Image (cartoon, rainbow, N blue to C red):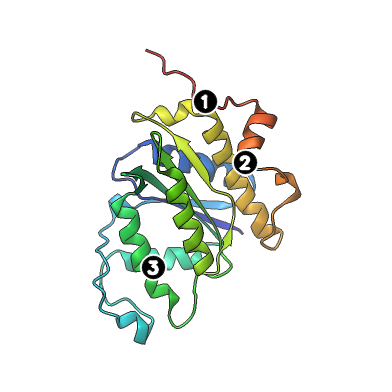
Amino acid sequence: EVKVLGIVFSPRRNGNTEIIVREALEGAREAGAETELITTRDYKINPCDGCGACHKTGVCHINDDMQIMYKKLLEADGIIFGTPVYFWQMCAQAKIFIDRTYALTFPNLKLSNKVAAAIAVAGRTGAVETLNFFTRYFISNHMICAESVEGLAYEKGSIVNDERGMKAARELGKQIVLMIKHGNRFPEEHDIPLYRIAQERYGASRYPKPSKQ
């Protein structure tokens, strides 16, 4: 069975990032995958200390909950990384996690050929820069890039008003599963970008609906 892992880096419980990543995982379930959501705020993950031990042993010496994360990453066929945008970039929790995955690059790239995607939630700017980083990260780890999704939200929970972002996220979940099943190729069902699928197939507005007062 196909396994898709969603990782939420937001320190906020039930925030916009968690909502939209759950939507993506729902799409993956619809496509037949087993899914799991992880919120890193529930785990103790320390920053990389730059010791270089993983260069020699292929194992990170820091004995914290990242050891649990390594196992989950390796077991997954597809991975969705979800982060809010703080000061035009990913949140600190996301960067700490990403830095710790350096241990998975020795002696070989252990995440290679896993289908990966990122979702960035921003109020106005920074999502593109954040997603560009993740694309580079995926490529450097020889992962297979699905599309990425930008979510637009200004207040807690307002991501649900971003119809295009939410529809695109659900389609992203389906896309990841289909890519895995089709041998890591883009499926024919997704012959146009996700934002166009959201607009053209679902009639989603390009702009978030105003919040009800």
Q: CA distance from mark 3 to mark 1?
A: 36 Å
Q: Nearer the viewer, mark 1 or mark 2?
A: 1
Looking at this rendering, what residue extends furthest in the top direction?
213
Q: Earlier along the polypeptide chain: callout 1 or callout 2?
A: 2
Looking at this rendering, what residue extends furthest in the right direction?
188
Q: Nearer the viewer, mark 3 or mark 2?
A: 2
Q: Is residue 175 left or right of residue 109?
A: right
Q: Is residue 213 left or right of residue 36?
A: left
User: What kind of residue is marked 1?
Assistant: Tyr
User: What kind of residue is marked 2?
Assistant: Leu
- Check residue 101 in the rendering and tell me which mark sits there, or answer none: 3
User: What kind of residue is marked 3?
Assistant: Thr
From this viewpoint, is residue 32 visible?
A: no
Looking at this rendering, what residue extends furthest in the bottom direction?
56
Q: CA distance from mark 1 to mark 2?
A: 15 Å
168, 71: nearer the viewer: 168
Q: Position of residue 26 (x, y in %)?
A: 54, 41
SS of the residue under disc 2: helix
SS of the residue under disc 1: loop
Q: Does residue 54 lie above or below 16 as drawn?
A: below
Q: Are marks 1 and 2 in contact (CB under 8 Å)?
A: no
Q: Earlier along the polypeptide chain: callout 3 or callout 2?
A: 3
Q: Residue at x 58, y 46 (%)?
A: 173
Q: Classify 10 Å Cα crowding around label 2: few (below 14), some (14-19), many (20 and above).
A: many
Q: Does residue 178 lie above or below 154 as drawn?
A: below
Q: Which residue is mark 1?
A: 207
Q: Which residue is mark 2?
A: 194
From this viewpoint, is residue 178 visible?
A: yes
Q: Position of residue 60 (x, y in %)?
A: 32, 76
Q: Residue at x 40, y 31 (%)?
A: 153
Q: Residue at x 57, y 34 (%)?
A: 167
